[in-house]
Amino acid sequence: MNEVLINYWPLLGIAVVVVGFVLRLNPIAVVVGAGLTSGLLAGKPLGELLALLGESFVSNRALMLFVLTLPTIGLLERAGLREHMHAWILHMQRMTFARLLIGYLGLRQLLSMVGLTNAGGHAQTVRPLLAPMSEAAAEKETGPLTHEQRQRVLALDAATDNVGLFFGEDVFVAVGAVLLIQGFYAQNGIVLEPLHIALWALPTAVAAFAIHTLRIMLFARRLRRERSDA
């Protein structure tokens, strides 16, 4: 009886990932190190492993664009992007905290409705642009923010981006969620066109805009009340 020997040594790559993340090392270095560890222990030549990494990078370069965004944002912040955004809002006399976030919510939803879901996001717009602008707009109305108030403003910024994206992208017919719904119904004998599903998502998007707009206005009023009570 022939026995098949299984090489378990490549599984050490998993241990490399666990140890790397526990020590909070650079995620890219950890993943590449784990891949090289598993490949070498599996008997792959180093040249073949490097070629495989290169092919994987090229085939998934669209995903890697997100990684390139982070150093770009870091350089812009080092050059004073947040300070410029803060000063810009202070010079806009009629800009308020509520108007800023409601405007961003509407723009985010409209862009998502036409498929431009990557035009915004936490890393691209919320942290470098929306956060300093909302802080400046809030400080114009209430004065310097406390640490707790600043954290609540940042949380509302992130929530506004999430609501705009989530309820806006479902109106776009080619988004994955719409195609998933259409495929699920088709498997169960119900034929629906993606356009019909997208149109039925429109009232939900309008309702989400109205509800979150009300939340923003109530939040702004609460900030002003806290300032007057202090």
Image (cartoon, rainbow, N blue to C red):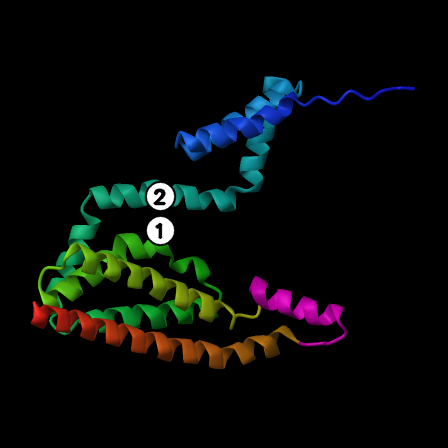
Position of the C terminus by quadrant = bottom left
Res. 25 image quadrant: top left
Asked if residue 176 is positioned above or below residue 32 in the image, the reply reads: below
Mark toward the start of the polypeptide (1 vs 2): 2
Asked if residue 78 is positioned above or below residue 100 in the image, the reply reads: above
- Image position, residue 190 (x, y; %): 73, 76
Asked if residue 29 is positioned above or below residue 5 in the image, the reply reads: below
Residue under the image location 40 percent in, 67 percent down: 163
Residue under the image location 66 percent in, 21 percent down: 42
What residue did someone put label 1 on? 123
Q: CA distance from mark 1 to mark 2?
A: 7 Å
Q: Secondary structure at mark 1?
A: helix
Res. 44 image quadrant: top right
Magenta span: predominant SS is helix
Q: Do we see residue 175 in this rendering? A: yes
Q: Do we see residue 50 in this rendering? A: no
Report the span colored magenta: 175-192
Residue under the image location 38 percent in, 59 percent down: 120
Amino acid at the residue labelled 1: Ala
Res. 229 image quadrant: bottom left
- Image position, residue 162 (x, y; %): 40, 63
Res 155 label: none
- Image position, residue 62 (x, y; %): 50, 46
1 and 2 marks in contact (CB < 8 Å): yes
Q: Secondary structure at mark 2?
A: helix
Instruction: Determine if the magenta segment contains residue 15.
Output: no
Amino acid at the residue labelled 2: Leu
- Image position, residue 170 (x, y; %): 52, 70
Res 70 label: 2
